[in-house]
């Protein structure tokens, strides 16, 4: 099981009341919410190995060099907040991230981040090479994320699926190729990446091909082999059925598509460290964990996770 950790603690932060506080009054809703998420995931899915994947760089320079608008609006928003906008909301999430890391380390739950790469890339690399996390080379892989971009990793042949939270982590969309076809109109993970490449993603500052939304992108892919390469080949084929406008827009977008492909698609060749991500059944550093529990008032959330780790399900497949 590979956790998109930031995606999950963001959900915890916004879904768990900030009335959950440490003895000194510091909010710990993201910390406690994430611990409850992990407890529920372990109880429901019984992974043999688990890696909390981290963003060592949420906006790698090599992606910005390819598409300068990549996440640029988020930088602007952060700059505005740092300058003291009237609407500024106190940041109570960032201080919780180091606490999350310390608690995971004390528990002995493996976590990994790689300089110059996003958590998505770390997830893709371990999904492609589960042996690097200490699992079997052919181990089934569950990716837990609230980011649909990672649907591109779905691969039935390699037993890679995405668990996408619908409500908390108690209700998950178990995303395999059948779900991708039924709900999103694409045949597999790579097909989802090609759909995202054509249509763009404003939330990540990726414009896509002008005038090509999701429905048009799906029609183009369906008509031309299911890949962006097939769509671009059709541009050069007079009888391909493309309209004059589509042909012109796709032709003008060739350079963008060539650059954006590396931005949209996860880097499964990210140099992730070899580690033993076997799920612990007891805290690796109990004294440190006890001190953290007291300092941050982790209470029942930590107790529940420790109980879950100590009593894994007997049918621990998956």
Image (spheres, rainbow, N blue to C red):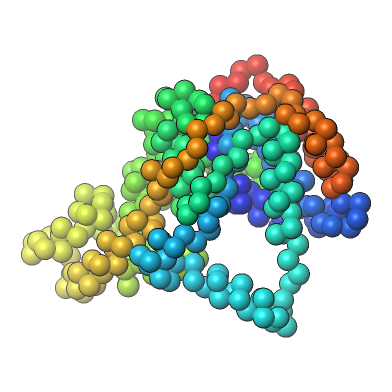
Q: Mark yes or no: residue 184 visible.
A: yes
The quarter of the picture where the N terminus appears is top right
Which quadrant of the structure image shows residue 49?
top right
**Residue beneath the point at 50% across and 37% down:** 273
- Residue 233 position in % (x across, y down): 15, 58
- Residue depicted at x 47% and y 40%: 272
Q: Position of residue 87 (x, y in %)?
A: 71, 79
108 versus 144 height, above or below:
above
Corner quadrant of residue 50:
top right
Q: Quadrant of the C terminus?
A: top right
- Work out whether residue 201 can be spotted: no
Residue lying furthest top:
314
> Quick one: which residue is furthest to the bottom in this view?
86
- Would you say 296 lies left or right of 43 here? right
x and y percentages locating residue 78 in the rendered image = 61, 72
Does 195 sit above or below residue 318? Answer: below
Q: Foreground: 289 or 45?
A: 289
Residue at figure coordinates x 22%, y 54% from the top left: 229
Q: At which x and y percent is residue 185?
A: 37, 50
Q: Nearer the viewer, residue 111 or 200?
A: 111
């Amino acid at each position: 099981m590979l956790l998109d950790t930031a995606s999950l603690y963001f959900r915890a932060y916004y879904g768990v009341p900030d009335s959950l506080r440490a003895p000194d009054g510091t909010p710990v809703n993201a910390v406690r919410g994430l611990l409850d998420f992990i407890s529920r995931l372990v109880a429901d899915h019984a992974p043999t190995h688990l890696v909390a994947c981290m963003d060592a760089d949420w906006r790698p320079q090599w992606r910005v060099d390819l598409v300068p608008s990549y996440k640029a609006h988020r930088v602007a928003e952060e700059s505005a907040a740092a300058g003291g906008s009237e609407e500024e909301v106190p940041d109570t999430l960032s201080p919780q991230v180091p606490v999350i890391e310390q608690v995971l380390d004390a528990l002995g739950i493996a976590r990994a981040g790689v300089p110059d790469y996003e958590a998505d890339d770390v997830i893709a690399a371990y999904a492609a090479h589960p042996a690097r996390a200490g699992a079997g080379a052919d181990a089934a892989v569950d990716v837990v994320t609230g980011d649909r971009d990672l649907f591109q990793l779905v691969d039935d042949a390699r037993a890679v699926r995405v668990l996408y939270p619908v409500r908390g982590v108690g209700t998950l969309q178990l995303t395999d190729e059948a779900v991708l076809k039924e709900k999103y109109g694409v045949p597999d993970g790579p097909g989802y990446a090609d759909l995202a490449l054509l249509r763009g993603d404003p939330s990540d500052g990726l414009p896509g091909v002008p005038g090509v939304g999701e429905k048009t992108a799906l029609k183009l892919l369906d008509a031309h082999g299911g890949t962006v390469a097939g769509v671009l080949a059709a541009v050069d084929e007079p009888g391909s059925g493309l309209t004059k406008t589509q042909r012109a827009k796709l032709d003008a977008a060739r350079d963008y598509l060539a650059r954006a492909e590396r931005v949209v698609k996860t880097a499964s060749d990210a140099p992730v460290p070899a580690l033993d991500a076997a799920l612990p059944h007891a805290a690796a550093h109990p004294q440190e964990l006890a001190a953290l529990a007291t300092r941050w008032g982790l209470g029942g959330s930590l107790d529940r996770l420790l109980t879950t780790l100590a009593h894994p399900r007997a049918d621990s497949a998956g």
